[in-house]
Image (tube, rainbow, N blue to C red):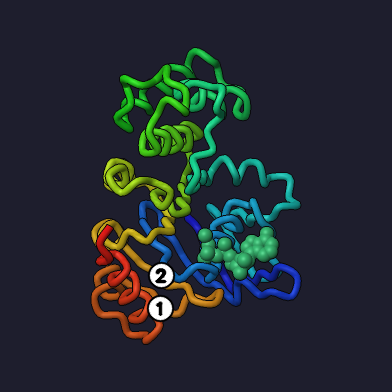
Amino acid sequence: MIEIKGVHKSFGSLSVLEGIDLKVNSGEVVCLIGPSGSGKSTLLRCINGLETYDRGDILVSSERVDRQSKTIHEVRTQVAMVFQRFNLFPHRTALENVMEGPVYVKKENPQAAREQARALLEKVGLAHRMDAYPDELSGGQQQRVAIARALAMRPKAILFDEPTSALDPELVGEVLAVMRKLADEGMTMVVVTHEMGFAREVADKVCFLYGGRIIEEGPSREVLGTPKQARTQEFLRRLLNHSEVPA
Ligand code: ADP
Ligand code: MG
């Protein structure tokens, strides 16, 4: 579904991705972990063409992701992205936010788009909040609207960039539960996260990024349970210690 081969990317003189190779099969969940600045967001942005890359290839369903190509819009509708900040339209209701893409980008019939949006909001547990505006919703609810909005484009894969990092701790679980449901249904997902419980239980594969390289990857239980690289061990130790700091 997604194939990344030897991808390099620099911002000016700053080398951010230094030869990334990664395969994500259909229905797989891959979690990307790693310290801040290791290139996780940049990699996701390259996969759906929000960012260019300098060398290598990124293929989505065998189609090369190339910001200059005429098919880039198609690639973008095939690969949805969910961000840390929900990026909902503030002046539109939850329902209107979910209808937006199908109606304005895909030119779908508004009535059909509305029906689909209702079903998707129901799926993410927001049947009772369809007519609420974003500022009337909690962060967790807003992020679930953002997930419904991503699904409305019927993507082949969804990329999540720290989807729960901006949430109050008590709201994290409801978003992870929705993501877990999507994974169970066979959605192909690449998830940047610091939620190690989610990664351990849901990911088929975990990749540890450090300095623009994947320096360790494998089944979640191995990478998180018995990491081989000293840097992975150190990262996981810090994460664990940090979460033990009392609030
Ligand atoms: P992560 O998501 O792992 O924290 P990022 O991919 O956001 O890492 O960033 C990797 C590096 O690239 C960082 O040093 C960051 O400052 C830099 N960077 C990211 N985006 C830009 C940009 N648009 N222009 C210049 N530098 C950037
Ligand atoms: Mg990031």
Along the line of sight, the residue nearer the viewer: 171 or 232: 171
Q: Is residue 187 shown above or below 31?
A: above
The picture places residue 32, in percent across and down from the top left corner, at: 42, 64
Along the line of sight, the residue nearer the viewer: 24 or 33: 33
On residue 1, the disc is: none
Q: Are marks 1 and 2 in contact (CB under 8 Å)?
A: yes
Q: Amino acid at mark 1?
A: Glu
Q: Amino acid at mark 2?
A: Cys
Q: Is residue 121 left or right of residue 99?
A: left
Along the line of sight, the residue nearer the viewer: 1 or 226: 226
Which residue is depicted at the point 54% across and 43% down? Answer: 78
Which residue is depicted at the point 59% across and 44% down? Answer: 76
User: Badge 2 is on which residue?
Assistant: 207
Label whose residue precedes the other's in the sequence (1 or 2): 2
User: Badge 1 is on which residue?
Assistant: 216
Q: Secondary structure at mark 2?
A: strand
Q: Is residue 57 shown above or below 142?
A: below
Q: Quadrant where the C terminus lies?
A: bottom left
Q: CA distance from mark 1 to mark 2?
A: 6 Å
| Residue 25 at least partly seen | yes
Q: Residues within 10 Å of mark 2 (few under 14, many from 20)?
A: many
